[in-house]
Image (cartoon, rainbow, N blue to C red):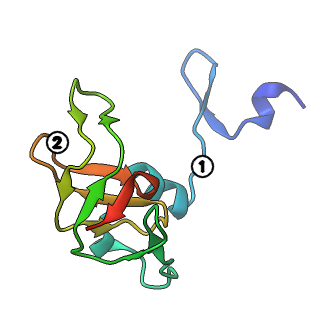
Amino acid sequence: MSNADALSGSRASDGTVCHVPSLDLAAIRRIVRCPASMKDPDMTDAIVRDSNGAQLNEGDSVTLIKDLKVKGTSETIKRGTLVKNIRLTGHPGEIECNTKQVKGLVLKTEFLKKA
């Protein structure tokens, strides 16, 4: 069996194999970052905790404990910034939120404390 036969893909007109990876639903969710309201109902809700171990819920306010550079921008969110009305993502280590500087931000909970 050749390398081309081992790949699951389709052949282009010039005979090359175009490999298309198969993604499961969980992988697609990680890529797309579905909002918490669109989560699959059969997913078990993990308890989300901040850096001090306090449980975080939808709509809570949190404070940053470290200056964070935002990828893809020149913005830095400063330590002590209050972030209101957080949304849970379904991943225990991440939350979604909006700040004055950046909208649609995903933050790791290890850099947050409950306000």
Quadrant for the N terminus in the image: top right
Identified by mark 1, the residue type is Ser
Question: Residue 59: image x %, image y %?
Answer: 21, 74
User: What is the residue that sits farthest to the top in this orientation?
Assistant: 14
Disc 2 target residue: 102
Question: Residue 86: image x %, image y %?
Answer: 24, 66
Give the crowd class for mark 2: few <14, some 14-19, many >=20 residues within 10 Å.
few
Q: Which one is in front, 92 or 80?
A: 80
Question: Residue 107: image x %, image y %?
Answer: 35, 51
Residue at x-position 30% and y-position 34%:
70
| Total numbered badges shown on the rendered structure | 2
Disc 1 target residue: 22
- Please indicate whether residue 68 sits to the left or right of residue 83 in the image: right
User: What is the residue that sits farthest to the right in this orientation?
Assistant: 1
Give the crowd class for mark 1: few <14, some 14-19, many >=20 residues within 10 Å.
few
**Can residue 33 be seen from the camera position used here?**
no
- Please indicate whether residue 105 sits to the left or right of residue 15 in the image: left
Instruction: Please state which of the two labelled residues, at mark 1 or mark 2, is closer to the viewer.
Output: 2
